[in-house]
């Protein structure tokens, strides 16, 4: 990225919900190695309805919020569509159980936020301020 305090993540999958889960994995992989980290709990987040870009922004912001306020990192995410938005279940580990590999994320940039479907394949990309 042109700015030294940014990383760019990309994810893709056959469904919108799986693409969001892959974006969570990409975000975490940018700052932590969770291989071998134990599952320490499950948390659930309800995401309000919005555009696809809004959903991506809100899911990634939820990861950053959990990291900053609870010292927890998702090992995996399961995303379920609801009539009122999304339900995201995160399988968490504690930050001290993971190996740091980069700077912790601080925010998701609105600039060049992308989440689209093309020919049955979903893809997304986001710039993360670290």
Image (cartoon, rainbow, N blue to C red):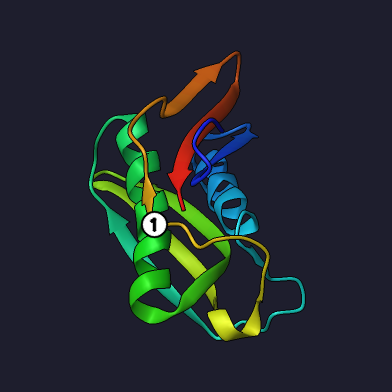
Residue 56 position within the rendered picture, expressed as x and y whole percent measured from the top left? 40, 40
| Residue that mark 1 sits on | 106
Q: Is residue 28 left or right of residue 107?
A: right
For image coordinates 62% across by 60% down, the residue present is 102
Disc 1: CA contacts within 10 A as few (<14), some (14-19) or many (>=20): some
Q: Is residue 65 left or right of residue 11?
A: left
In depth, the one of 119 and 55 nearer the eye is 55
For image coordinates 65% across by 77% down, the residue present is 98
Quadrant occupied by the N terminus: top right
For image coordinates 42% across by 51% down, the residue present is 60
Residue at disc 1, secondary structure: loop
Residue 108 position within the rendered picture, expressed as x and y whole percent measured from the top left? 38, 45
Quadrant in the picture for residue 37: bottom right
Count of numbered badges drawn on the protein: 1
Q: Is residue 33 left or right of residue 70?
A: right
State the residue lying farthest toward the right.
36
Residue 8 position within the rendered picture, expressed as x and y whole percent measured from the top left? 56, 38
In depth, the one of 112 and 13 nearer the eye is 112
């Amino acid at each position: 990225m042109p700015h030294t305090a940014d990383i760019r993540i990309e994810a893709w999958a056959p469904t919108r919900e799986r693409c969001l889960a892959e974006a969570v994995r990409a975000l975490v992989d940018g700052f932590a190695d969770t291989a071998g980290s134990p599952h320490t709990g499950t948390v659930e987040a309800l995401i309000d309805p919005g555009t696809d870009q809004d959903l991506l922004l809100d899911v990634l912001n939820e990861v950053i919020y959990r990291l900053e306020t609870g010292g927890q990192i998702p090992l995996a995410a399961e995303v379920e569509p609801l009539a009122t938005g999304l339900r995201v279940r995160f399988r968490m580990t504690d930050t001290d159980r993971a190996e740091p590999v980069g700077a912790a994320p601080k925010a998701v940039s609105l600039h060049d936020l992308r989440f689209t479907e093309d020919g049955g394949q979903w893809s997304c990309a986001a710039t993360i301020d670290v």
